[in-house]
Amino acid sequence: MKRICILGSTGSIGTQALEVIEEHSDLYEAYVLTAYNNADLVIEQARKFKPEAVVIANETNYNKVREALADLPIKVYAGAKALCEVVQNENVDIVLASMVGFAGLEPTIAAIKAKKAIALANKETLVVAGDLITRLANQYQVPILPVDSEHSAIFQCLEPGNKIDKILLTCSGGPFRKFSKEQIKHVTKSDALAHPTWNMGAKITIDSATLMNKGFEVIEAKWLFGVKPEQIQVVVHPQSVIHSAIQFEDGAVKAQLGVPDMRLPIQYAFSYPKRLSLSGERLDLFAMKDLTFEAPDTDRFPCLRLAYEALHQGGNMPCIVNAANEIVNRAFIDDRISYPRIAEIIEKTMNKIAFSKESSLETYLNTDKEARTYASSLL
C-alpha cells in the first residue's frame, strides 16, 4: 500500500488523482490532503477518503475545516509552514506536487529532503528552480516522476542507454491557434478559458492560451531529461492524440499516444515502472480522420519566445518570467488587463529585474518577490 500526500487535492490534477486512488484502493491511500482556499471541497474529500491529515493553507479557513472534521480522527493543520511539514511524515511514500504556481516550490524541496518520491505536476517548481531541484534530487536520491501529459509521454518513450537527439513536445495550440494577430488583440477571458481539448484550472488554461504553458514545459523538459534548449522542438498538434515524442540518434521517432485523460500520467507516476488497468475511453485509431502538425507562431504567441529566451539565459531569468506571468495571468482573469499586455508586461519585467546566476532558494525567493512587485506596478 502506497500512502500518497496530495499537495493541491482540490485542483484539476488533485481531484483526478483521487479518482485513481479510488479505483485502486487496494494499492493506494490518500494519506494527506492539502488545499489553499477551497475549504468546502477539501472537507468533502476528507470525509470520503479519511486521510491521516488535512492542511488548509489559507489560515482563515482553519476553524471551518477543523470543525467540519471534528467527528473524524483526522489531524487538521493550517498555513504554508504546515505544507512543508506534512510532506515529511514518515509514512508518506509519494508526494504529488500539484499545487499551482510558485507556492509549490518550498513544499517540494521539503519533500525531496525527506526522501519522498515526487510525482511532479507543478511545472513552476522546475521552471523557477530547475538547477536546484535536480541537484537536490540527485543528492537525496529521489525520483522525479513527471505528471504533465507531455513529459509523462517523453518519460514513457525513454530507452536506457540510448541518447535523445530531439524532444518533440506537442502542443494543442490553444483556443486562438487560427486567430490572426489582429483578432488576438481583442480576445476575452471567456475566449481564453474555452480550451479545445483539455479541462484544466483557470491559471493553466490561460497559460495554454498564451502558449506560456508550453514555454514552461520546454524549460521543464530541459531539467527532467538533461537536454539542451535547441534539442526541444515544440510541435502544434491540435488533436492531442500524440502526447509527445523522442527522436533518437539514428532518426527513429518514438511517440506515446492516447486519449486526453490526465488520470493516465497520474497513475503511471504512482505505479511506475508497472502499468495498471484504468477505466475510461480507449484510443480508436480508425476514428482518427486527421493527425496534423504545425510549427508554433512566436509572433502571434510571444510568450513562447520569452520562455525560450529565459531558458537560454538561465540563472534566475525563468524565475522572473514565472513571477511576472503569475501576476499578469491573475490580472487577465480579473479583467484588469488585455490579452496583448500579458507578454508585454512579462518582457518588461525580464528587462528590469537584476539577472543572477545564483541557484539558491534565497535567490529565487528574492527574485520572485522583486519581479512580482515590478510586474504589479505595470498593471
Image (cartoon, grey):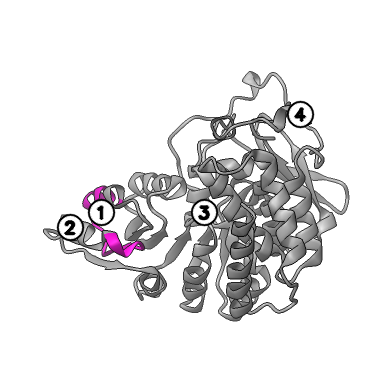
**Mark 2 or 4: the one toward you:** 4
Secondary-structure class at tag 2: loop
Residue 57: in magenta span: yes
**Residue drawn where x is 58% and y is 48% of the image:** 329
Of the 4 image quadrants, the one containing the N terminus is bottom left
Look at the image and give the residue range highlighted in magenta. 42-60
Residue 182: mark in rendering: 4
| Residue type at tag 3 | Lys
In contact (CB < 8 Å): disc 1 and disc 2: yes
- Horizontally, residue 282 falls left or right of residue 154, namely left
Residue 123 image position (x, y, % from top left): 59, 57
Residue 41: in magenta span: no
- Determine which residue is flagged by label 3: 274
| Residue type at tag 1 | Ala
- Determine which residue is flagged by label 2: 69
Is 291 located above or below residue 335 in the figure? above
Corner quadrant of residue 175:
top right
Secondary-structure class at tag 1: helix
In contact (CB < 8 Å): disc 4 and disc 1: no
Is 242 located above or below residue 75 in the figure? above
Distance in Å between CA atoms under marks 4 and 1: 48 Å
**Mark 1 or 3: the one toward you:** 1
In contact (CB < 8 Å): disc 4 and disc 3: no
Secondary-structure class at tag 3: loop
